[in-house]
Amino acid sequence: MRNLLVLSVLLVSMCVSAQQASVIIEDDSQTDLFIKAEAIPTEVRSGRNLDMVFEVRNKRADTVRNITLLAYDQCLFSGDNTKTFVEIRPNETKRWSWKWLAGDVNVRRDCNIGFKVDYEADFYRTQTLAPRHQTL
């Protein structure tokens, strides 16, 4: 199963003042996982860090296995971008953060940071059959 989301961050040159606000995306629409991503700050100066904070919670009644979150951007950030868990038990939450370094730019640049989550889960379906008897 797969889940895709996108965050927007602004990359600016060193001569622009930066804000210390954050942008947060919470995706509760998935039936299996709750995913929260936060980028701090929303405006990053060249050569400065962007903190990416992630939270993934298993909403299922059973364990989810082989969970991998991959974050990617079209800008000049560098740092770790893949996190893997062997399993997440029911109602268990995993939190972590990455610190990304912003590269040099000469003009303001909008950056879209996307991420996807791949995982394995079991699907169960039960159905009752009632045979019909016919007499000839």
Image (cartoon, helix red, strand yellow):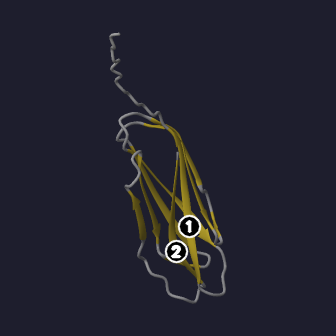
Q: Would residue 47 be found to the left or right of residue 98 on screen?
A: right
Q: Is residue 130 above or below residue 90?
A: above
Amino acid under label 1? Ile
Q: Position of residue 45 (x, y in %)?
A: 56, 80
The quadrant of the rendering that contains the C terminus is: top left
Query: Alpha-carbon neighbours of circle 1 within 10 Å: few (<14), some, or many (≥20)?
Result: some
Q: Position of residue 70 (x, y in %)?
A: 58, 54
Residue that label 1 marks: 113
Q: Which mark is residue 3?
A: none
Residue at disc 1, secondary structure: strand
132 is higher (above) or lower (below) than 63: above
Q: Nearer the viewer, residue 108 or 15?
A: 108
Q: Identify the residue under disc 2.
A: 9
Q: Amino acid at mark 2?
A: Val
If you read the primary sequence from the N terminus, does the residue marked by circle 1 or circle 2 appear first?
2
Q: Up-down: is 88 above or below 13? A: above
Determine the residue positioned at 40% across, 31% down: 125
Query: Disc count in the image?
Result: 2
Residue at 53% across, 69% down: 50
Identity of the residue furthest to the bottom in this view: 15
Q: Are marks 1 and 2 in contact (CB under 8 Å)?
A: yes
Q: Residue at x 62, y 61 (%)?
A: 79
Local packing at callout 2 (Cα closer than 10 Å; few below 14, some 14-19, many 20+) is many
State left or right for residue 42 relative to residue 101. Answer: left
Left or right? Give the position of 62 relative to 67: left
